[in-house]
Amino acid sequence: MAEDLTITEGSKEERYQALLPQIKALIEGEPDTIANLANISAALKEQFNWLWIGFYLVKNNELVLGPFQGPVACTRIKKGRGVCGTAWEKAATLVVPDVEKFPGHIACSSLSRSEIVLPVIHNEEVVAVLDVDSVLLNDFDDTDKKYLEEIISWIAISV
Ligand code: SME
């Protein structure tokens, strides 16, 4: 396919509905996980322009920074630490409406106000997390959870 993304205006739901097939087309048939994680991050950044979008990969029992879009970020996060390490430990999506109220939140950027972190699960184990940060308070809800979970369900991890 041509590597151009069509950016959509409209409700959050409409923007996800236009974006999802484009992401699917981008990663379909490409077996390289890093390439796919990079394009997923870029496509989400282009459509939603959130502060930070990216992946941390589980390596030697730590989360290690993977492909992302946005400001430089901390490179390693331990299990149970911050929002990312907690989502990993619980193997559950975490929506944090106000990061200052999340005990142990790791502030990679002082501009971040709200956050969603989703575990990428393969063979019943968390192998990565998708982390999205916004400069707005309370920017993430069940719509983001639903569509971002669908996107990460397409990732075949082989790193
Ligand atoms: N805020 C995250 C750390 C990663 S950065 O936001 C990119 C956390 O608390 O785990």
Image (spheres, rainbow, N blue to C red):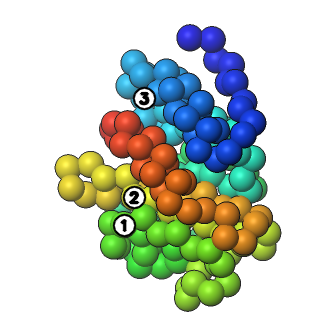
> Are dots 2 and 1 in contact, CB under 8 Å?
yes
- Count residues near mark 3 (Cα–Cα under 10 Å), then give few for <14, some for 14-19, many for 20+: few
Closer to the chain start, of discs 2 and 1, is: 1
Specify whether 19 is left or right of 52: left
**Whether residue 59 is situated above or below residue 47 in the rendered picture:** below
> Are dots 2 and 3 in contact, CB under 8 Å?
no
Disc 2/disc 1 C-alpha distance (Å): 6 Å
Near-viewer residue (29 or 79)? 29
Closer to the chain start, of discs 3 and 1, is: 3
Q: How many marks?
A: 3
Specify whether 19 is left or right of 147: right
Q: Position of residue 82 (x, y in %)?
A: 53, 77
Q: Position of residue 101 (x, y in %)?
A: 62, 87
What residue is rendered at 63% in x and 51% in y? 53
Q: What amino acid type is highlighted by mark number 3?
A: Asp
Near-viewer residue (39 or 12)? 12
Query: Residue 119 sits in which quadrant?
Result: bottom left
- Secondary structure under badge 2? strand
Question: Which residue in the protein does label 3 denote?
Answer: 32
Specify whether 4 is left or right of 122: right
Question: Which residue in the protein does label 1 denote?
Answer: 92
Closer to the chain start, of discs 2 and 3, is: 3
Disc 2/disc 3 C-alpha distance (Å): 19 Å
**Is the distance from the Cβ of mark 2 to the nearest ligand 1 atom less than 8 Å?**
no
**Whether residue 64 is situated above or below residue 66 in the rendered picture:** below
Q: Farthest residue to the top: give it.
A: 1
**Whether residue 155 is situated above or below residue 52 in the rendered picture:** above
- Count residues near mark 1 (Cα–Cα under 10 Å), then give few for <14, some for 14-19, many for 20+: some
Question: Which residue in the protein does label 2 denote?
Answer: 119
- Secondary structure under badge 1? loop
Q: What amino acid type is highlighted by mark number 2?
A: Pro
